[in-house]
Image (spheres, helix red, strand yellow):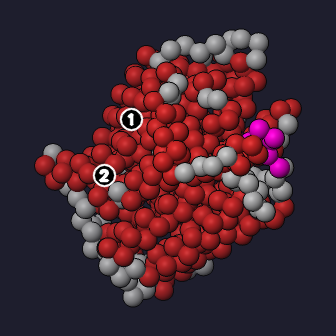
Amino acid sequence: MSFGFFGIQFGWALQMANMSAIYEYLGASAEQIPLLWLAAPVSGLIAQPIVGYLSDRTWCCLGRRRPYFLIGAILSSAALILMPHCSTLWMAAGLLWILDTSINISMEPFRAFTADLLPAEQRTQGFAMQSLLIGCGAVVAALLPWYLNHFFAAGDRGTNGSGIPFTIEISFYLGAAVFLAAVVWTVVTTPERPPEERFARSQSEPQTFGSAVREMVALILQMPERMKQLAGVQFFTWMGVFCVLLYFPAAIARYTFGTMDKSSPLYADGIAWAGVCIALYSGVCCLFSLLLPRLASVLGSKMTHSLCLLCGSVGIISLLWVRDRYFILLPMACFGIAWASILAMPYAMLSQSIPAKHTGIYMGIFNAFIVIPQILTALGLGWVMSHYLHHNCLLAVVLGGFCLLVAAVLVLSVEDLPWESRDGIPLLQNQLSANS
């Protein structure tokens, strides 16, 4: 049931770890990279609410959620295969639009898939397996270029015609195969039950584009108050995360491995080591997410999320002084703790407010609080880099750490939640596992 998420996370992690480097290999300057990444948040802003709404109302021969898994996987795999062969920046940016939109088509319905199929007494076990596979996918994908370089000497083959290292090219081919195979496994082995009678009646009612838009707008206007309160937290959290994801590989290559020459093997080694760091924080995220329910039951959800964000902030800011490649693993472990909470706690804090029949679309709407700060960062960070950060990639990463610090303070202003109620802790455990 959850194995498809291994493939989805595999493709997403390859994109996060390598796209900035691909842009640089194709000639992009540090100031251009945020704008070239604009595809990722914009596609999420558009695709996730629409796919969530449609999957809530779909039933066909493949079921309710599985058609979206499969369509997204096919498109994503094609984009992953083509990406290393881009010869210009506009080609890579266009393919990123396709890739990120396709990943969103597969990813969004998976949030509701487990809850659709499992009885209540089995959801914790099912969600824990999903968390494990998400973490495994991210770790393996992030390590892949480094592994190919050091154990198969793929780096000795140099670069392809586009100037992209063969280690990255092979990684994307493997990613395409893993993405499609994992999702197909879930589609083939996990049948969905027919929808309830009330859902079948609503599906048979006439539904025009205009009525669908009006319903979505009405749901946005009626969003839970807690979702509004979390908007500021999510804004600064994902602005910080986006700064880190955009510039961390380049910062490692330039300021840890000490080279600005993108054609140098040392620069490729730096990009590959950044993948090792990303694999580490993904692994820490996977393990720490298992501790979050117990920690939240002791400290409360707000304090838990605030402390985790603070831990990640301190780790990222400390990169200003850490230069040894092995010591960098410690700050990235701190970021992994924050990452576990970012993927889980906001959803747990929101969970009691979402109507079950609108789970898909409200998860998509909540995603807007993630992608809007990314869009603003993509539009403005290049200008900030040019005018205030002196084209320094490391300072852009550290700026992300300060954004996480602001988010850690803001989360304390969110209303307290009744997790101490009789059913609160089991619900929190299920929701944390589902969203990590």
Q: Give the image location of residue 348, x and y in percent.
A: 61, 28
Q: Residue furthest front?
A: 206
Range shown magenta = 194-199
| Residue at 69% from the left image edge and 11% from the top image edge | 420
Disc 2 to disc 1, C-alpha distance: 13 Å
Judging from the image, what secondary structure is the residue with disc 1 in? helix
Q: Nearer the viewer, residue 268 or 200?
A: 200
Three-letter code, disc 1: Phe
Q: Is residue 329 left or right of residue 118?
A: left
x and y percentages locating residue 383 in the rendered image: 18, 51
Between 256 and 133, the one lying in front of the other is 133
Q: Is residue 391 visible?
A: yes
* Residue type for callout 2: Ala
**Dot 2: what SS?**
helix
Is residue 347 rendered magenta in the image?
no
Corner quadrant of residue 181: bottom right
Q: Which residue is mark 2?
A: 378
In the image, residue 48 above or below residue 262: above
Residue lying at 30% horizontally and 66% vertically, measured from the top left: 259
Q: Quadrant of the C terminus?
A: top right
Q: Earlier in the sequence, mark 2 or mark 1?
A: 1
Q: Which mark is residue 436?
A: none
Q: Dot 2, crowdedness within 10 Å: few (<14), some or many (≥20)?
A: many
Q: Which residue is mark 1?
A: 235
- Place residue 229 in its image quadrant: top left
Residue 26 horizontal/vertical position (percent) = 32, 75
94, 225: nearer the viewer = 225
